[in-house]
RNA sequence: GGUCCCAUCGUCUAACGGUUAGGACAGGUGGUUUUCAAUCACCUAAUCGGGGUUCGAUUCCCCGUGGGACCGCCA
C-alpha cells in the first residue's frame, strides 16, 4: 500500500505552531512508510490569501526540515477542475443551486440563536423544480437519514447522525469552489491516502466523505489530532503570543529542538524524550498519538533547546548561530569567526537559546567594552591595583594556557589576602564589561594578548 | 443552545485489568564551583467525583462535574 500524506495550510496568516506540528506528523507518517509528503497551499480565499504568507509557510517548513516532495501544489490553479466536479455532482443529483439570499439565512440564524435551537440550513431549495436565472450557490445534497462512520486512526470510530450535517455550499455565488469541494477534489487527484489534520476538522471529514462517496472515489484514511492549546486552555489563535514559528526562531530556538518538542507534544514513545530526526521517523506511529489536547510549555521548549545546544558539535552550532545572528542580530565580522568557532564550547554553556549564546559572545563581537555603571562601582582602588599587577605578570607569560594563568591569579589572591572573586571579578568586568559572563580563563584565552592588555589598561 | 470529543503530578506524558502509579520539564533542598550558569544527589507533586462490572480497576460501562472543538458563500 502506498502512503501519500499532505499538509494543506491556507496562506492567510503566518504559519501557526499547531499547523507546524500537523505538517510534522504528516511528514513523519509518510517518511516512516516510505511514502510521499506533499504541501498544498489552499489559497481559494482570494481576499485573505497573501503571497508573503505562502512564502513564509514554505520557508518555515524548510527551516524545520520538513521538506515536501514535488513542488508545492497551489490549489487555486486547479479551480476549473473543482468547478467541473461540482457540475458533475449537480448532474448526478448530488448537488443543487440554492437561491436563498445571505440576508435570509442570517435572519434564520439569528432566529435559531434566539430560540436556542441548532441552526441547519432548512434545505428550502433542495427540491426546487424550476431553475431561476439569478446567481445561486451550489449546495451539496447531504444525506438526511442514517449515520456516517469514520474510522479515525487517532480518535477511533466516530459516528454521527447525518441529519446534523447541513447541505453545505460547494460553489459560491461567484462560481468559486469552497474548501469542502476543493480539498476533497485535490486530495483525490493527489491520491492522498492519509489525511492528518487538526481535530477541528472532524465535521469536515464527515462532509467530505459524502462527496467521496457521491463521486465513487476511494475515501482516504483520516487521523484527527488534538489541538494545541494556549496557556489559557483555548485553541491557539494568532493573537496568542509565541504561537507562530517565527516567534520561536527569533529568540534562537534551534530547528531540531523545536521539531523534537513538537513531536513529543501529543505523541510519545515510552520514556524517550530526545529523538534524532531519523529516530523520529523510525519510531513514529499514529497509535502513539493521544486524544486530549496539550498546552504549550515554553520552559520545556527552552529546556529541549538547551540540551540540543549543548549536544550538537561546535561546528554545527556555529552554523546555526551564524545563520541566526545574520538574520536577527548583526552579521558576524569575518575576522571574528575563528575566535567564535573556537569559543562555542564555553559560550554555549550558559545558553538556553542562540540569543543567549549571542549575549555571551558580546565581548568578542564588540571591539569596545562598555562597562555598566552598576559594575563600574565594583572597581575600587584595590581592584585597579590588582589589574595593574596582573597586566605586568600577564605580559611576562611566554605561553598562554589555563596552567600558566592559574599561578598568576593564585599569587594575586594570596598577596592581597582575598578570594577568587576579589581578583576575578575586576578582571572580568574590565574584559567583558560585566560581572557576569563566561569563565575567566576562557575569556582571557579567547582574546588576543594585545586585546587583553588594551582592555585591562582602560580601567 | 445543538452535535461531537477529552479527562493521570503545575506542564508534556508512561502504565493498553494486577506497578510502592514511572519518566521528563518546572519547583524545592543540599554538595561542588570562578560570577551568572552548568552539574551531581535528594525531595515535593497526579489517577476529577459517584456508582457499577471484576478476585482485582488509572485502565471497561453508566451518571455527574470540568474542559474543548464545531455549528461561514473561512480554511
Image (cartoon, coloured by chain):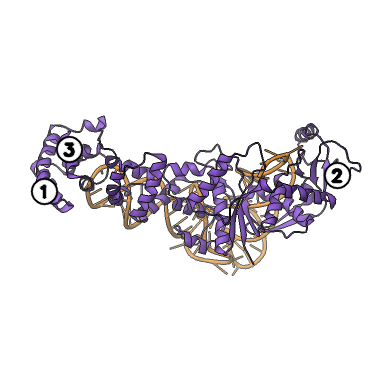
* Left or right for A172, reference A3: right
Residue at 37 percent across and 46 percent down: it is: A322
Looking at the image, which is closer to me, A307 or B6?
A307
Q: Nearer the viewer, residue A239 or A179?
A: A179
Q: Gap between marks 2 and 1, in whole Å?
A: 94 Å
Marked residue nearer the N-terminal end (2 or 3): 2
Disc 1 is placed on an element classified as loop
Q: Are marks 2 and 1 in contact (CB under 8 Å)?
A: no
Q: Residue at x 48, y 46 (%)?
A: A297
Residues at marks 2 and 1 on the same chain: yes
- The label on residue A319 is none
Q: Quadrant of residue A11?
A: top right
**Residue under mark 3: which chain is it in?**
A
Between the C-alphas of marks 1 and 3, the distance is 16 Å
Residue position for label 1: A397
Q: Who comes first in sequence, dot 1 or dot 3?
A: 1
Q: Chain of mark 2?
A: A
From the viewer's perspective, tell me whether residue A22 is left or right of residue A206. Answer: left
Residue designated by label 2: A126
Front residue (pair A35, A264): A35
Q: Nearer the viewer, mark 2 or mark 1?
A: 1
Residue identifier under label 3? A454
Q: Which chain is purple?
A: A
Coordinates of residue A188 in the picture (x, y in percent) = 70, 56
Amino acid at each position: 500500500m502506498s502512503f501519500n500524506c499532505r499538509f494543506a495550510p491556507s496562506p492567510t496568516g503566518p504559519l501557526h505552531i499547531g499547523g507546524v506540528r500537523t505538517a510534522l506528523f504528516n511528514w513523519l507518517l509518510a517518511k516512516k512508510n516510505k511514502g510521499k509528503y506533499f504541501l498544498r497551499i489552499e489559497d481559494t480565499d482570494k481576499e485573505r490569501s497573501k503571497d508573503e504568507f505562502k512564502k513564509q509557510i514554505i520557508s518555515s517548513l524548510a527551516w524545520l526540515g520538513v521538506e515536501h516532495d514535488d513542488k508545492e501544489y497551489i490549489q487555486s490553479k486547479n479551480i476549473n477542475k473543482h468547478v467541473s466536479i461540482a457540475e458533475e455532482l449537480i448532474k448526478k443529483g448530488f448537488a443543487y443551486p440554492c437561491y436563498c439570499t445571505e440576508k435570509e439565512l442570517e435572519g434564520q440564524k439569528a432566529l435559531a440563536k434566539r430560540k436556542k435551537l441548532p441552526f441547519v440550513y432548512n434545505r428550502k431549495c433542495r427540491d426546487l423544480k424550476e431553475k431561476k436565472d439569478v446567481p445561486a450557490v451550489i449546495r451539496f445534497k447531504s444525506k438526511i437519514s442514517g449515520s456516517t462512520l469514520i474510522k479515525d486512526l487517532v480518535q477511533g470510530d466516530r459516528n454521527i447522525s447525518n441529519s446534523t450535517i447541513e447541505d453545505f455550499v460547494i460553489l459560491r455565488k461567484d462560481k468559486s469552489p469552497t474548501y469542502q469541494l476543493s480539498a476533497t477534489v485535490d486530495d483525490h487527484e493527489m491520491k492522498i491516502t492519509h489525511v492528518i489534520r487538526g481535530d477541528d476538522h472532524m465535521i469536515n471529514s464527515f462532509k467530505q466523505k459524502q462527496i467521496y462517496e457521491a463521486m465513487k472515489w476511494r475515501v482516504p484514511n483520516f487521523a484527527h489530532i488534538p489541538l494545541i492549546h494556549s496557556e489559557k486552555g483555548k485553541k491557539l489563535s494568532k493573537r496568542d503570543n509565541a504561537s507562530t514559528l517565527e516567534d520561536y526562531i527569533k529568540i534562537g530556538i534551534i530547528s531540531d529542538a523545536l521539531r523534537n518538542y513538537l513531536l513529543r507534544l501529543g505523541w510519545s514513545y515510552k520514556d524517550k524524550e530526545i529523538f534524532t530526526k531519523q529516530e523520529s521517523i523510525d519510531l513514529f506511529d499514529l497509535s502513539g498519538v493521544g486524544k486530549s489536547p496539550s498546552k504549550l510549555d515554553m520552559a520545556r521548549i527552552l529546556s529541549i533547546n538547551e540540551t540540543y545546544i549543548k549536544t550538537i558539535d561546535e561546528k554545527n552550532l556555529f552554523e546555526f548561530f551564524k545563520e541566526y545572528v545574520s538574520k536577527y542580530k548583526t552579521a558576524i565580522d569575518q575576522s571574528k569567526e575563528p575566535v567564535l568557532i573556537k569559543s562555542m564550547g564555553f559560550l554555549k554553556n550558559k545558553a538556553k537559546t542562540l540569543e543567549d549564546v549571542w549575549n555571551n559572545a558580546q565581548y568578542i563581537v564588540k571591539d569596545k567594552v562598555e562597562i555598566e555603571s552598576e559594575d563600574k562601582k565594583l572597581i575600587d582602588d584595590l581592584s585597579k591595583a590588582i589589574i595593574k599587577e596582573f597586566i605586568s605578570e600577564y605580559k611576562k607569560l611566554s605561553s598562554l594556557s589555563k596552567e600558566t594563568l592559574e599561578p598568576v591569579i593564585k599569587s594575586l589572591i594570596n598577596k592581597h589576602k582575598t578570594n577568587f572573586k576579589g581578583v576575578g571579578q575586576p578582571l572580568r568586568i574590565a574584559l567583558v564589561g560585566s560581572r557576569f559572563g563566561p569563565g575567566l580563563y576562557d575569556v582571557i584565552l579567547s582574546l588576543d594578548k594585545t586585546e587583553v592588555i588594551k582592555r585591562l589598561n582602560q580601567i
